[in-house]
């Protein structure tokens, strides 16, 4: 008689004992036999199985024998139980597997254009000596579901459904479905007839999980295996995905998933997987260029005249000597504060550290800033005021896996931070997380939301205060947390009295009953994670918006625990790191204020001897320098005479572009270090060719404070150099021109590598003290603060106490946006990104795969407004504000409410939405109000020509 194995009662914690191939193993309840065998290094073949996907046991390749039951089962579905005796490799099993493979091969027509090396079906067929008895005929047309990034060949499909499950379970999309029956069964897009109709996001996940090449990257067809794979970090958004660059003959030919990537595993978005084509674009800058006016010996009559003179290619010495001489002259003549530097959130931590060191040590100014000013300066200011640290408190992984509810406000997550967007979709689908979306637009995430509230643009303080009012009124607040860990509660609570649902509804347009529903979900689901992005920050009330959210999370006691926290999503790939490195006018590396007595450590470490200054004179002042917007204005006034810009494009990305272009044109001497001739290049006097992410080494820090390695895969093109090398050499030349000699123990500019720069960062920055390239190379996962070389990093901030001690409630009151609609400009314009582009579009517009999916500037217009104006989809429209005009195509959609239009900021020239935006600034963070200005719409004639 066969003895039945024992199953433990549900929830009972036991370790199970079982035997596999004559060896004894233990297993946790719920583990499959395949899990246990693989952990022990026992090879069981699989095809339909993938560890990221729910098992379906359909291919039967992983059959194993359970000796005591005397039957075979698919190991991927067979749950381990006490006393099991498993055989994985008997002659009968091998025979069964060979037969399974033979059946699969009977319907499989190999296309030699697809990657044979990673074809799992062919691999196992070789291993088991399986062959089809006949050559199967193609039953489906090749390329049956054309997509810009994928080639679909159903003749290679074995119906393992990894693509269907990957799209649903990993990506949170449901593009692929099964159609027909029997022999005609095949996968197809589920809604409509095309992948686009089915809302495919071209992420390539289905191809990445396909084991046979039925779904394949279109651009990789016909390519053999690459020469090598280099694991590195994405240079688009702040999620910080890692992947493998496939290098062939010195070129990046493909990006493939690396399952060990800490943040994203196999997931990538369309930009990460396919947006690398700009690396080899013919526009790449290959040699330094100088305006002819600077080489002729006689000064041009004006900055504008110099910038109008033609470019001349020169060698590095000529270019750097000129830059060093001119910046040194300006410093001597007008003082250090006549020079400004813009660091870059696209560049590495090491490069940003050097930029601010150059500003403070060599030039002697705090005029250093970068594009964080334009995206999250209000977050940094607001969270520092509330908690003492301006960074994301939690990790994407913990909030997506452990939050009971999530409040996403002002973040179009699936388009701006796509892989985190997929994690949120998974959290809703897989474990029923409640999702509240507050956004003036009906963004994609709304499809997954429990509730969507559509506040009017610029009314977030009133909305959040209104929710806090209801939470207090219903006693959903966490009295214990507030009493133990916070201060300022009484004044805050009193300030909420007037934010009644009726009052808030008048301001925000959100009906009182919706406010009540949202407040209940926020108040009764614990832990709650709050997620935001530029919809919160880019307002004249940006800091107050952040303070209101910080109040909310203290009120609910959601800080310092997994699944909770404040989670501002940083935009650019290394905007977090550029801030950490002190590329800001008010703080040094590690957010040490320039006004703090502690900066004496920097003054001493970087000490230099100026020939014209007393040795005791501080290197840089204790007053914060100018922000980027202030530097641009100062250039127009002539108080900033020299501007050194690393990888930023203010002519494209600053608000009120016409003003910015005029200011840059009027700035006496502009040096631009870039990989491509951006819009700002028109206003530069010197262009220095830089290196893209694939061409350099260093580190990026993602939105959750995770420091990750960037590894060089290819050489920079032409004579282009890694940016840290250029900045270091320039610093040495300026030192020489100013007759400055290093004196402090970190004053030298002789770095042998980015790892050496990071050693200096660690020595001067307490939160990075334990970070080193060596630890990262060892695979250690480090989120700052990392206070020592043995510290494991800090995934969650503010666990037992806030960085500032007690969390501080702030009273914040609703203030209207700076510019509201009137009869002349009756519509509100709000701006943002689309999935297929990034920031000013400098990179994504030079990646044909991305550009093909969004080739023109568009504005979203509500059906009501379109009817009133006689517009239809694709109509050319002229959008006008008090500052300028923008040409675009009309996209008629209910994503926007009547009275509001949305424009993306990825296209230059007449298609630049920043021709319209306003320079009104938050008074504390100096962030511009990109999210609200008043415009009107007209029909436009003629052809839109956007490069
Ligand atoms: Fe790159 Fe962001 Fe896409 Fe990840 S989500 S692949 S980091 S752009």
Image (cartoon, helix red, strand yellow):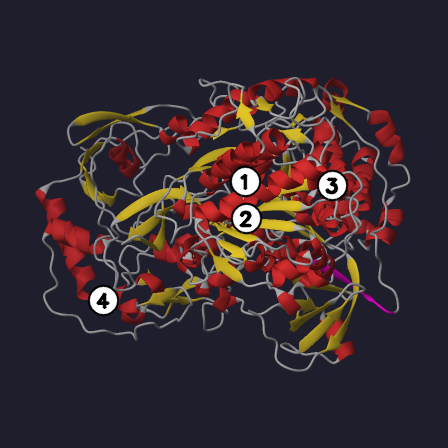
The residue to which callout 1 is attached is 400
Image quarter in which the C terminus is found: bottom right
For the residues marked 4 and 3, what is the alpha-carbon distance in whole angstroms? 56 Å
Is the CB of mark 4 within 8 Å of ligand 1?
Answer: no
Q: Which residues are magenta?
A: 824-831
Q: Nearer the viewer, residue 95 or 151?
A: 151
Tell me whether circle 4 and circle 3 mark residues in contact (CB < 8 Å).
no
Q: Which numbered tag is attached to residue 111?
A: 4
User: Which numbered disc flags the more N-terminal residue, 4 or 2?
Assistant: 4
Tell me whether circle 3 and circle 2 mark residues in contact (CB < 8 Å).
no
* Residue located 89% across and 31% down the image: 494
Q: Nearer the viewer, residue 814 or 421?
A: 814
Q: Is residue 826 magenta?
A: yes
Instruction: Decide if residue 704 is in sight here.
Output: no
Q: Secondary structure at mark 1?
A: helix
Is 62 situated above or below 793? below
In the rendering, at what x and y percent does residue 849 appear? 44, 64
User: Which numbered disc flags the more N-terminal residue, 3 or 1?
Assistant: 1
In the rendering, at what x and y percent does residue 675 appear? 48, 53
Q: Which numbered tag is attached to residue 520?
A: 3
Q: Which numbered tag is attached to residue 647?
A: 2
In the rendering, at what x and y percent does residue 436 appear? 67, 47
Mark 3 neighbour density, 10 Å: few (under 14) some (14–19) many (20 or more): some
Most frequent secondary structure within the magenta stretch: strand
User: Which numbered disc flags the more N-terminal residue, 3 or 2?
Assistant: 3
Is the CB of mark 1 within 8 Å of ligand 1?
Answer: no
For the residues marked 1 and 2, what is the alpha-carbon distance in whole angstroms? 33 Å
For the residues marked 3 and 2, what is the alpha-carbon distance in whole angstroms? 46 Å
Q: Secondary structure at mark 4?
A: loop
User: Which numbered disc flags the more N-terminal residue, 4 or 1?
Assistant: 4
């Amino acid at each position: 008689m066969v003895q039945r194995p024992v199953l433990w009662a549900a929830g009972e914690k036991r370790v199970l004992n079982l035997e596999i191939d004559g060896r004894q193993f233990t297993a946790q309840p719920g583990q499959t036999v395949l899990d246990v065998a693989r952990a022990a290094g026992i090879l069981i073949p699989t095809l339909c199985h993938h560890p990221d996907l729910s098992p379906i046991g359909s291919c039967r390749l992983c059959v194993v024998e359970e000796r005591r039951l005397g039957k075979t089962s698919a190991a991927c579905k067979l749950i381990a139980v006490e006393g099991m005796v498993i055989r994985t490799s008997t002659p009968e099993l091998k025979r069964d597997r060979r037969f399974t493979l033979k059946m699969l091969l009977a319907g499989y027509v190999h296309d030699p254009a697809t990657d044979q090396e990673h074809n799992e079906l062919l691999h196992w067929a070789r291993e088991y000596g399986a062959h089809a008895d006949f050559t199967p005929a193609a039953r489906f047309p090749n390329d049956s579901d054309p997509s810009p990034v994928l080639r679909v060949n159903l003749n290679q499909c074995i119906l393992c459904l990894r693509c269907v499950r990957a799209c649903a379970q990993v990506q949170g999309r449901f593009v692929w479905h099964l159609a027909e029956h029997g022999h005609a069964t095949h996968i197809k897009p589920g809604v409509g007839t095309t992948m686009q109709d089915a809302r495919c996001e071209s992420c390539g996940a289905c191809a990445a999980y396909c084991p046979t090449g039925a779904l394949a990257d279109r651009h990789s067809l016909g390519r053999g295996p690459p020469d090598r794979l280099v694991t590195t970090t994405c240079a688009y958004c702040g999620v910080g995905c890692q992947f493998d660059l496939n290098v062939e003959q010195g070129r990046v030919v493909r990006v493939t998933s690396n399952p060990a990537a800490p943040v994203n595993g196999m997931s990538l978005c369309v930009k990460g997987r396919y947006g690398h084509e700009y690396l080899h674009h013919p526009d790449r800058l290959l040699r330094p260029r100088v305006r002819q006016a600077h080489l002729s010996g006689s000064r041009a009559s004006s900055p504008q005249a110099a910038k109008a003179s033609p470019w001349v290619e020169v060698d590095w010495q000529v270019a750097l000597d000129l830059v060093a001489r001119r910046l040194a002259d300006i410093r001597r003549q007008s003082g250090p504060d006549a020079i400004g530097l813009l660091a870059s959130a696209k560049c590495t931590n090491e490069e940003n550290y050097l930029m601010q060191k150059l500003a403070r040590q060599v030039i002697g100014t705090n005029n250093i800033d970068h594009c964080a000013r334009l995206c999250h300066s209000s977050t940094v200011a607001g969270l520092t005021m509330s908690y003492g640290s301006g960074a994301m408190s939690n990790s994407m992984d913990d909030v997506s896996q452990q939050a009971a509810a999530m409040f996403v406000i002002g973040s179009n997550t699936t388009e701006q931070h796509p892989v985190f967007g997929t994690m949120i979709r998974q959290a809703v689908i897989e474990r029923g997380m409640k999702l509240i979306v507050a956004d003036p637009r009906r963004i994609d995430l709304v499809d997954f939301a429990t509730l969507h509230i559509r506040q009017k643009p610029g009314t977030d303080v009133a909305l959040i205060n209104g929710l806090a009012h209801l939470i207090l009124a219903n006693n959903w607040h966490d009295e214990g947390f507030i009493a133990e860990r916070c201060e300022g509660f009484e004044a805050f609570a009193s300030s909420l009295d007037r934010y009644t649902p009726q009052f808030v509804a008048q301001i925000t347009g959100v009906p009182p009953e919706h406010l009540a529903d949202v407040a209940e979900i926020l108040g009764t689901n614990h832990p709650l994670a709050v997620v935001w992005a530029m919809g919160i920050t880019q307002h004249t009330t940006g800091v107050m918006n952040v303070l209101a959210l910080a109040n909310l999370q203290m009120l609910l006691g959601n800080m310092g625990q997994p699944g909770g926290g404040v989670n501002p999503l940083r935009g650019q790939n290394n905007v977090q790191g550029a801030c950490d490195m002190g590329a800001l006018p008010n703080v040094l590396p590690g957010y040490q204020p320039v006004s703090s007595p502690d900066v004496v450590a920097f003054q001493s470490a970087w000490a230099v001897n100026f020939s014209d200054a007393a040795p005791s004179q501080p290197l840089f002042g204790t007053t914060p320098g100018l922000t980027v917007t202030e530097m641009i204005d100062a250039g127009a006034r002539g108080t900033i005479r020299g501007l050194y810009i690393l990888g930023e494009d203010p002519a494209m990305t600053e608000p009120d572009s016409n003003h910015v272009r005029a200011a840059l044109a009027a700035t006496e001497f502009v040096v631009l270090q870039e990989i491509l001739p951006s819009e700002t290049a028109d206003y530069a006097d010197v262009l220095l060719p830089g290196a893209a992410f694939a061409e350099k080494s260093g580190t990026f820090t993602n939105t959750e404070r995770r420091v990750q390695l960037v590894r060089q895969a290819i050489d920079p093109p032409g004579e282009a150099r890694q940016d840290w090398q250029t900045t270091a050499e320039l610093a040495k030349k300026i030192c020489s021109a100013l007759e400055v000699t290093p004196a402090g123990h970190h004053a030298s500019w002789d770095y042998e590598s980015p790892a050496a720069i990071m050693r200096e960062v660690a020595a001067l920055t307490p939160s990075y003290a334990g970070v080193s390239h060596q630890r990262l190379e060892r695979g250690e996962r480090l989120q700052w603060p990392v206070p020592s070389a043995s510290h494991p990093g800090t995934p969650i901030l503010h666990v037992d106490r806030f960085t500032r001690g007690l969390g501080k409630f702030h009273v914040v009151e609703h203030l209207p946006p700076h510019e509201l609609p009137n009869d002349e400009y009756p519509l509100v314009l709000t701006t943002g990104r689309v999935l297929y582009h990034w920031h000013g579009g400098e990179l994504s517009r030079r990646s044909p795969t991305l550009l093909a999916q969004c080739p023109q500037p568009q504005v979203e217009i509500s059906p009501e407004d379109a009817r009133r104006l006689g517009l239809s989809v694709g109509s050319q429209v002229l959008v006008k504000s008090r500052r300028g005009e923008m040409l675009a195509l009309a996209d008629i959609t209910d994503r926007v409410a009547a009275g509001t239009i949305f424009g993306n900021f990825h296209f230059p020239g007449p298609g630049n939405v920043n021709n319209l935006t306003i320079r009104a600034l938050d008074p504390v963070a100096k962030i511009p109000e990109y999210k609200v200005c008043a415009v009107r719409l007209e029909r436009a004639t003629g052809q839109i020509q956007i490069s």
